[in-house]
Amino acid sequence: MSSTKFLDIFNNVDEYKQTICSKVIDVIRTSNRLAVENFDQILTIDSCQDKINKLSERILNRIYQIKSHIQSSNWNQLDLDEKIEQLVDINDTLFEQIASALDEADGIKKSPVSTTMRQILIKPQLKFKYKIDNSTIIPFISKIRIKPNALTPLPMIMTHMNFESIDPNLLEKHPEILDHPYFDEITAFEPDEILLKKIEPQYPKSIEETKYLFVDTVEKLKIMMDHIEMQLELAVDLEHHSYRSYQGFTCLMQISSRTEDFLIDTLTLRDELSILNNVFTNPKVLKVFHGADWDIEWLQKDFGIYIVNMFDTYRAAKELNLPTLSLAYLLKTYCNIDASKQFQLADWRIRPLPKEYCRYAREDTHYLLYIYDRLRNQLLDLNENNSQLLRLVYTKSKIICQKLLIY
């Protein structure tokens, strides 16, 4: 063993990591034992109050020291939440630096994406046409103005509503605007017999061989629409940002056909994406999701988009009693693809998106139609070619589509 000490105290990096981890665990255990629910009562005890005041002073001093690292000339003008947000950003950056330095000391060289410092981003929501309303005074009202593929018409008032200024009294006069606009269409949907029979699974070409378009302009959106309107099956996924955000917002949408992949910049095209209802509410086009519960709500909230005819591979995996229900497991089991965990907590607001982010996002939908083929056949095999289990997955998927965002 080398006589060189790490930080002049520890024999090596591993010893340092173990010592730090042990101390962190002690802190977490201690904090978990704090009687937070009795905090107000504890404050009435003089001896405790004195200790708490001293501790608070130490914390404020630490915050002041950290503040000196913040590149902000308007610190005093920020409200408390904004100050906390900036402090958390600095904290994240410091931890990234620590992790990077430890790996470097360990002889590990990370990829450029993993060592990139957190970017100071202009909040994309500031550019949204319709501002995010975090109030709870008025319930959620769909942004939908046009209803393609309709069996029942959209309430007339919704075609000309001002979503930026909604009168609370309007709800008393027109309670129908709170209803799910596609409830009747989803309820009426039944899968065609062709969707209830076994098929020959179609394994896709590799990511590198597959045509791909990053959709960030109206012109590219039209190109994508021309393609997907000709398809009978599509795979769909979303990347959502909710870190230190009350409701969050969708940053990226992935759509794959059997032959092409699309990544849609939903930050740039947020106010243009209702056109997707032409396809997403078309009962003749199957939309395949994995774990769609949140996706359905995000599509409603951010874009006024609804889904008719959906197959959730998560529900299928559950009916098959697979040992794990994650998309990563399905990718490995059916496609021998190891899904990278590196980007699971990625900040999808970053623009331009690094190539590594784009590849990870494409993988979520690129193989999903093939996985659907395999699960569909397995459901039929398990039930001796009886479509009962397959119908059950469609029914459970339909119930998810009928979910109505409420807040």
Image: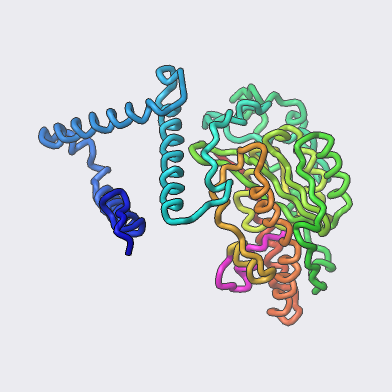
Q: Measuring 63% from the left and 68% from the top, which residue is drawn there?
A: 332
First to last magenta residue range:
310-325
User: Is residue 286 something one can see in this rendering?
Assistant: no
**Image location (x, y in percent) of residue 154:** 77, 37
Q: Give the quarter of the image for residue 159.
A: top right
Q: Quadrant of the N terminus?
A: bottom left
**Image location (x, y in percent) of residue 294:** 60, 49
User: Is residue 192 something one can see in this rendering?
Assistant: yes
Q: Measuring 61% from the left and 53% from the top, which residue is drawn there?
A: 293
Q: Give the quarter of the image for residue 350.
A: top right
**Is 215 colored magenta in this rendering?**
no
- Say whether residue 6 is left or right of residue 318: left
Single out the residue that lies furthest toward the front: 3
What colour scheme was applied to this rendering of the protein? rainbow
- Say whether residue 289 is left or right of residue 75: right
Name above or below for residue 25 compared with residue 406: below
- Pick the residue in front: 98 or 77: 98
**Image location (x, y in percent) of residue 220:** 82, 39
**Image location (x, y in percent) of residue 371:** 71, 66
Name above or below for residue 2 compared with residue 167: below
- Say whether residue 15 is left or right of residue 394: left
- Pick the residue in front: 51 or 354: 354
- Pick the residue in front: 366 or 399: 366
Q: Quadrant of the C terminus?
A: top right
Q: Measuring 71% from the left and 49% from the top, which residue is drawn there?
A: 254
Single out the residue that lies furthest toward the left: 47
- Say whether residue 29 is left or right of residue 85: left
Q: Give the quarter of the image for residue 76.
A: top left
- Pick the residue in front: 57 or 188: 57
